[in-house]
Amino acid sequence: MVVVLSLLRRRLPVSVLVVTSALAGLSGGFALLLMVVAWSSGRRIVGAGRALGAFTASYVLYVGVTVAMTWPGLRPLTQVLFTTLYFLATTLVPGLASRYWTQRRTLLHALQERKHS
């Protein structure tokens, strides 16, 4: 499953991000893949609104699945807080960093082309 998702992350960034988020909520073994997929999705999802929707859906699935799986063990509010912080650090930050890096690189290329024209 990890290999398939890893291979599809460039062609279907939104779908793979959402599916990987749900799987990471079920099993911590998908955490590293989620970071890679978040980086790739931040770079490949076209449009800020679409990216916002994809990352929001993946957040809701990740938190929902994680809380559902550990509900009896911890207080739900505490679990949501810790899960949110973990998601921000491992998924949203790489996604935003990748998006920023890609936009910056595109802008620099456009400026260089304009300078040489």
Image (tube, grey):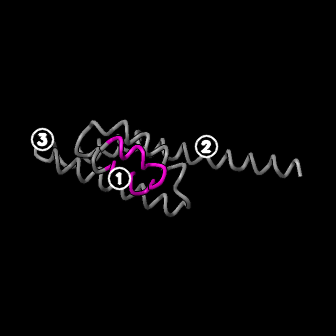
Helix, strand or loop under label 2: helix
Q: Which residue is found at the position 16% from the left and 44% from the top?
A: 70
Identify which residue, 110 or 100, lies in the foreground: 110
Which mark identifies residue 101?
Answer: 2
Pointer 1 residue: 59
11 magenta-colored: yes
State the CA–CA distance, disc 2 to disc 3: 40 Å
Find residue 74 and report its image quarter: top left
115 shown above or below 32? below
Identify which residue, 5 or 38, lies in the foreground: 5
Task: Choose the circle earlier in sequence order: 1 or 2.
Answer: 1
Helix, strand or loop under label 1: helix
Q: Which residue is found at the position 39% from the left and 51% from the top?
A: 17
Numbered disc total: 3
The answer to whether residue 43 is left or right of residue 88 is right
Front disc: 2 or 3:
2
8 shown above or below 46? above
Q: Main secondary structure of the magenta part?
A: helix
Looking at the rendered structure, the kind of residue marked 2 is: Trp
Q: Find out whether the residues at labels 1 and 2 contact each other: C-beta distance under 8 Å.
A: no
Pointer 3 residue: 73
Looking at the rendered structure, the kind of residue marked 3 is: Gly
Q: Find out whether the residues at labels 1 and 3 contact each other: C-beta distance under 8 Å.
A: no
Task: Give the residues drawn in magenta, as a range.
Answer: 2-21
The answer to whether residue 7 is left or right of residue 2 is right
State the CA–CA distance, disc 1 to disc 2: 22 Å
Q: Residue furthest bottom?
A: 49
Residue 45 position within the rendered picture, expressed as x and y whole percent measured from the top left: 52, 56
Q: Which residue is found at the position 43% from the left and 61% from the top?
A: 53
